[in-house]
Amino acid sequence: MEGYASSSSSSSFDLFDAFVFLGSGNVIIEEGKKGLNPGMVVLLVVGGVLLLFLAGNYALYTYAKKTLPSRKKKPVSKKKLKRERLKQGVSAPGE
């Protein structure tokens, strides 16, 4: 195996030598998983909390829509009623 760099100076047949023997010079050996990626854990926690918040808001909104009475409309002042009637050309009563 001349021309290839070996990862060990001993004559033992390790994983790198096996890949070199197969004719592959540029080999990337993946290490085993070391656990969960911390960035992914943060992303999952924040996403879960956000999803829980939105689902809770929607549930409260639908519950309130069913149980609370409808809002009363604001009473229109007499001054505004008189102004609207004058715009439409109808004279206000008493004038």
Image: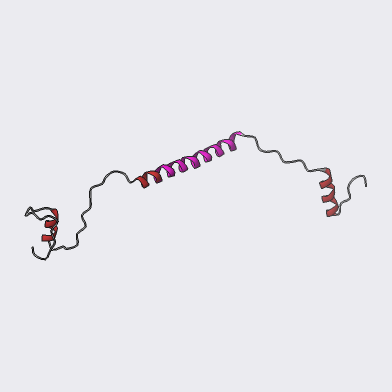
Q: Which residues are magenta?
A: 43-67
Q: Residue furthest bottom?
A: 3
72 falls in the magenta region: no
Q: Is residue 62 left or right of residue 74?
A: left
Q: Residue furthest front?
A: 9
Q: Residue at x 78, y 43 (%)?
A: 76
Q: Position of residue 87 (x, y in %)?
A: 83, 54
Image quarter (top left, top right, bottom left or bottom right) of the N terminus: bottom left
What type of secondary structure mainly makes up the magenta span? helix
Determine the image quadrant of residue 45. top left
Above or below: residue 14 compared with residue 44: below
Q: Position of residue 26 (x, y in %)?
A: 19, 62
User: Number of callouts in the render?
Assistant: 0
Front-most of 45 and 6? Answer: 6
Q: Is residue 21 left or right of residue 28?
A: left
Q: Residue at x 10, y 60 (%)?
A: 21
Which color mode does the image show?
A: secondary structure
Above or below: residue 30 compared with residue 46: below
Q: Residue furthest left?
A: 11
Q: Position of residue 6 (x, y in %)?
A: 13, 58
